[in-house]
Every structure is written in structure tokens, then in C-alpha cells.
Image: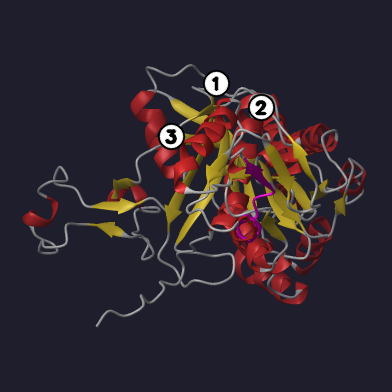
Amino acid sequence: MSQKPTPLSGFPELLPAERVVEQQAIDVLRGVFELHGFAGIETRVVEPLDRLAKGGEIDKEIYVLRRALSDPGTEDESSDLDGRVLGLHFDLTVPFARYVLENSGKLEFPFRRYQIQPAWRGERPQIGRYRQFTQADVDIVGQGELAFHHDVEVMRVMVDALAALPLPPVSFQFNNRKLIQGFYRGLGIADVTAAIRVIDKLDKLPAEVVAQQLADQAGASAEQAERCLELASIRVADTSFVEQVRALGVEDDLLDAGLTELAAVVEGCAAAATDRVSVEANLRIARGLDYYTGTVVEIFMSGYEHLKSVGGGGRYDALADDGKNVYPGVGVSFGVSRTLVPLIADGVLSGSRSVPSAVLVAVADEASRPASDAVASALRARGIPCEVAASPQRFGKQIRTAERRGIPFVWFAPTGDDGGHEVKDIRSGDQVAADPSTWSPPDSDVRPHVVLQQ
């Protein structure tokens, strides 16, 4: 006896109307990225396990690929995989770094790339964190060097992209690793890297606990810890942070460079801000990953602070290194699934209908189906999505079928020598004469669209 399948947690599957939301969001992101001249790429879903390792240590959350009937740990397991153990990629940065190295001789630098793909991570599923999820990354990578103005460009591209999505208000919160490293160095902190890691915990721990950890882990005095916390408390929507940092009395060349760069990023992105997308300098943002060397950003969504950031990124001076060239870059990643799935589950976002069809062409009887098919062909030739009724039920039932599916119009072809074509807007009840070679629905009805519940 067959049984209903048991769902797998952490692998979200969307219903058709929900899939409309994801598809249109991806289309919007792709459109904005390409408008700014970024080329789309897609990398393979697997990488050698040693490449996926972090600092030489294998992450226990990596999914490993092997044949179902092979013996784990034997030559048989990897005989068709070039002798290497492969894992599914857990982000898009690792495969992108490998892609740059493999294709460096064929790419033009600076290389402007976007990538929208699923990734896999074997962690405990929870709201906003899934075992399979889609990310959208945008990066510019140089060969040997990469001018700073690309930092501003990449960040602004993502501001433009999220401003084009029907999301609740989002906030881009910027900082600069040079700024905080220079500040700690100017203060005389013994272990600057440890200090950055500790400050990155401020959203999780009370200030007094962070101050104690600065002393224990970074060798900071009580006065130095207090200055670090004062720096981390600065959060403004303009470049006034420069004066506030200067007022703390710390001097360092790296600090000066960081202040200049952060001011440029904030000014450049603020010009693209809208009523739903804001830009801030938040000197608490550190991003714990070690490879960030300049600009850093975290993206937060209003009302969904429990998700933590829905995107982030920054400047890295060594995305990849082939022994001859170093490839610096700057990029931002947006969590498509992390953002959209909770919004869909909460009813904040929905698709206007579950099918692409704008028109259901009614069928009076099977003998008249060819005439209905001809109407559908005429509409499709002009880019109007439609479908022909599955069976010649009473017209009232066919209208109710369209209503259930969210199809806004029903077309009635003439069934005899008398009469003509008519189309009915089932929402208003209006029914008018129409010519399948010239009639078009309103632009807003041609395709399903995303509905944002305010």
C-alpha cells in the first residue's frame, strides 16, 4: 500500500503561485545586474572536498557526493570521479574562485560577474536557514589589482537590485575593515584580529561581556575596550561618522584610509537609496570572515531582524592566487531563499495567480475545439499566455475553473454562423466583442506579478 511521502526539512518546495515570487525576483535581479554590465555565469554544483575545506579543516555541514552502491572510503567510491572526493558547494564564492583560476586566460579583467544558483549546507533547518537555498552574488574581480571605485559600484548595484524588488524595507549597513583595524592599531590593541572577532559578537552579547572578552582575548585594557565600544556605537545615515571617529582621538594611516573609503561608499550608495532601501554607516559591522580587507556590508530587512542579515559581502584582496597572480575582488551576496521563503510563508509576498495564462479559451463542444485552438494560437503569436479548456463543460463551470486558477479572462469563440468572438473579464463581469488578432489584455494582466501585502 502506497503512503504519502514524508517531507524533508530544510529543502523548501514552492507551490506554483509561490514560485512566481521567486522566479520574478530572480528575473529582476538578473535584469539589474545585466543593466550594469555584469555577465551571468553558472558553475558546477560540486567541488573537490579539499577545495571546500576552510583553512584545511573539513566543514561537517558539507554534503559529499558518491555513488549509491559504492563502498565509502574505497577506490570504488571515487573511480568515476577522477579519484577525488567531491562535495556540493555551500556558497558561490568557492566555486567562483576556482572558476577564475581555471579560466583566467580567457577572461577580461576586471571581470564583472553575477551568479544566481542553489547551494547546499547540511545544517539544522530553521526559518531563513535551509539545507538547499538559492543565492544571488555579484562581484568584480581584478588581476593583480582592483581600483577602489569598484567597491562603490558593486555595492550600488545591489542597492539598485533590492530597490527593484517588492520587499519590506531593507537597510544596507556598511563599515570598513581598514577603519576598524586602523583604529584598534592606533589604540595599541595587542591582537587586532581577535578584537575584530570579539566586536562581531556585539549583536549576541551584552557590551560588558564583549569588553571582558576584549581584555581576555585581544589584550585590551579597560580604557581601550571602552574606546572600541564607543567606535562600535557609531551608526549614522551620512558621512558624519568621520567627525565622530576623529573625536575619539585615535590616529593611524590605515584608519584614515578606511574613513575615506567608507565615506565614498556611503555617499555613492545613498544616491541610489529609496523610501524602502536605506544606507547607513554602522561601525559595529565587522563580518567575521578573515578574507575581508576593506569595505564590508550587512543587509537587514525590517520586521525580519530574527533572520539576522539577508545578505552581505565586501572587499577581499585575494579571492584566488595561482602563484603568478593574485585576484582581488569585491562582491555582495543576497540570500534569495533566505529572504523570500519566510515572506511567502507569512503571506507578505504572493503571486497574483498560479498559472501564467491570462486567458482561458472556452470550448463549447469537442467539435469546436479546433476553433478554440486557433484563437489560442492567435493570442500566443502576440505574446499573450493562454490555454484551452480541458473539457467542454457548461460555460459557467469553465468560468469557475478560470477563477480558481486566477486566470482573469475567458474567451468565447463563435459556435455557428451567427455571432462573433467575445472575451469576458471574470473579475468585473464585463463581456465585450473582441478580435483574436488585435485584442490584448491590460499590461498588468499579461503575466503573473508579485503582490506585496503592506
Instruction: Answer few, some or many: residues within 10 Å of disc 3's Cα (few below 14, many 20 plus, some between 14 and 19).
Output: many
Q: Amino acid at mark 2?
A: His
For mark 3, what is the residue?
320
Give the image quarter of residue 139. Answer: top right
Badges 3 and 2: C-beta atoms under 8 Å apart? no
Look at label 3 and name its amino acid.
Ala
- Residue type beneath disc 1: Pro
* Image quadrant where one finds the C terminus: bottom right
Q: Position of residue 145 (x, y in %)?
A: 55, 23
Give the class, few, some or many, for how many residues have Cα within 10 Å of label 2's Cα (few <14, many ≥20).
many
Q: CA distance from mark 3 to mark 2?
A: 18 Å
Q: Is residue 26 above or below residue 74?
A: above
Report the colour scheme: secondary structure
Q: Which of the two discs, 3 and 2, sits closer to the camera?
A: 2
Q: Nearer the viewer, residue 132 or 326?
A: 132
Q: Position of residue 378 (x, y in %)?
A: 57, 28
Q: Which residue is nearer to you in this view: 277 or 362?
A: 362
User: What residue is at 79 percent from the left and 58 percent from the top?
Assistant: 232
**Pointer 2 or 1: first along the chain:** 1
Marks 3/1: CA distance? 14 Å
User: Helix, strand or loop at disc 3?
Assistant: strand
Residue depicted at x 44% and y 68%? 123
